[in-house]
């Protein structure tokens, strides 16, 4: 257990625990609303903010966060102002953000370590400040999710009923989009643009396979996310392989075991 005495591993574990708490929690609602493409869209569109930060010499994370929030608000606005489906809106904004990021990066020459970090993630390289920012934002997001869980659940199941019961469904929908956008950008910092949406979807899928109730679904999803991060970090440390990819592969392995285990139990019963 000597890896727990290493400062960079301690930071990685704490940040991983924080993101493993909120990504799977949000993933439950994303799965219920069939919004998996939204996560990929935010992650790829954030490249524009990352590139803007690199080009201007600012912190790429804050650029990605600003673009991520703008993306969420943009999807919400276009869904309500046009007759375009959410998939079309997300596809347009996602490819536009990605294209803008590529154009901005063309003004930079040479190796760009920040860009590589955001593309593939590097949870082991986060600083003390990064960890505190991620933990702080994760605490706020988890608190809001916990407070409004009943509202988000009702909207996911039946928006009309939620509206007739007195809920401000439009404002709650916008809030959900913003929470999801911020969470995805936090995940991009740790796991990278390419892999972050997997931690949004895989734990929720495991929970859906095994949980007998909604509370069980949320609980199992969070537990699965935390296990994937913890075990993935441990494996990556001892085998000296990329941590982000190992975390996702660990989650995928857990999903396969859940599928097999469920099938075996059904055959026995």
Image (cartoon, rainbow, N blue to C red):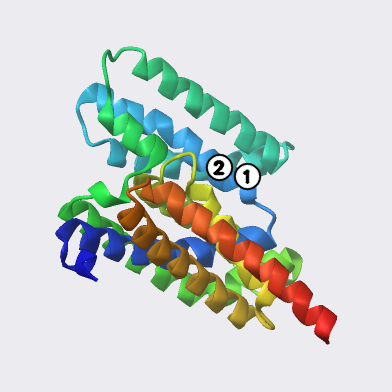
Q: Which residue is mark 2?
A: 40
- Mark 2 nearby-residue class (10 Å; few <14, some 14–19, many ≥20): many
Q: Residue furthest bottom?
A: 269
Which picture quadrant has residue 168? bottom right
Q: Is residue 189 visible?
A: yes
Question: How many residues crowd mark 1 within 10 Å: few (<14), some (14–19), many (20+)?
Answer: some
Looking at the image, the residue that sits furthest to the front is 239
Helix, strand or loop at disc 1?
A: helix
Residue at 53% x, 56% y is: 200
Q: Where residue 236 appears, x then y in whole percent?
A: 36, 54
Q: Is residue 172 visible?
A: no
Which quarter shows the C terminus?
bottom right
The answer to whether 105 appears left or right of 93 in the picture is left
Q: Is residue 207 above or below residue 106?
A: below
Numbered tag placed on residue 201 in the rendering: none
| Marks 1 and 2 close (CB-CB < 8 Å) | yes
* 242 with respect to 207 (left or right): left
Dot 2 falls on a residue whose secondary structure is helix
Residue 249: horizontal and vertical position, in percent? 52, 53
- Foreground of the two, 2 or 132: 2
Q: In the rendered image, which residue does mark 1 sit on? A: 37
In this image, 247 relative to 167: left or right? left
Question: Foreground: 102 or 221?
Answer: 221
Tally of numbered tags: 2
Query: How far apart are labels 1 and 2 at the CA level?
Result: 5 Å
Q: Position of residue 34 (x, y in %)?
A: 69, 54
Q: Residue at x 65, y 60 (%)?
A: 31
Residue for point 29% across, 41% down: 62
Residue 81 vs residue 233, the one in the foreground: 233
Residue 54: where, in percent of width, then height? 26, 27
Name the quarter where the N terminus is drawn: bottom left
44 vs 28, left or right, is left
């Amino acid at each position: 257990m000597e890896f727990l005495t290493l400062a960079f591993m301690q930071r990685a574990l704490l940040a991983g625990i924080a993101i493993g708490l909120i990504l799977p929690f949000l993933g439950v609602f994303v799965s219920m609303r069939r919004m998996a493409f939204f996560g990929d869209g935010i992650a790829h569109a954030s490249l524009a903010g990352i590139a803007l930060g690199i080009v201007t010499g600012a912190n790429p994370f804050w650029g990605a966060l600003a673009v991520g929030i703008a993306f969420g608000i943009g999807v919400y606005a276009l869904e309500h102002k046009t007759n375009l489906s959410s998939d079309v809106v997300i596809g347009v904004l996602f490819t536009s953000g990605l294209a803008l990021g590529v154009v901005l990066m063309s003004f930079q020459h040479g190796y760009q370590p920040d860009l590589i970090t955001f593309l593939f993630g590097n949870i082991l390289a986060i600083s003390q400040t990064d960890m505190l920012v991620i933990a702080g934002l994760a605490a706020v997001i988890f608190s809001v999710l916990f407070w409004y869980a009943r509202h988000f659940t009702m909207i996911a199941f039946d928006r009309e009923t939620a509206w007739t019961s007195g809920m401000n469904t439009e404002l709650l929908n916008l809030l959900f989009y913003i929470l999801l956008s911020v969470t995805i950008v936090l995940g991009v910092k740790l796991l990278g643009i390419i892999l972050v949406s997997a931690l949004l979807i895989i734990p929720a899928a495991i929970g859906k396979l095994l949980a007998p109730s909604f509370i069980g679904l949320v609980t199992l999803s969070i537990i699965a996310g935390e296990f994937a991060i913890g075990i993935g970090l441990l494996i990556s440390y001892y085998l000296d392989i990329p941590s982000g990819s190992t975390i996702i592969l660990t989650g995928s392995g857990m999903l396969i075991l859940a599928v097999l285990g469920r099938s075996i139990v059904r055959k026995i019963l």
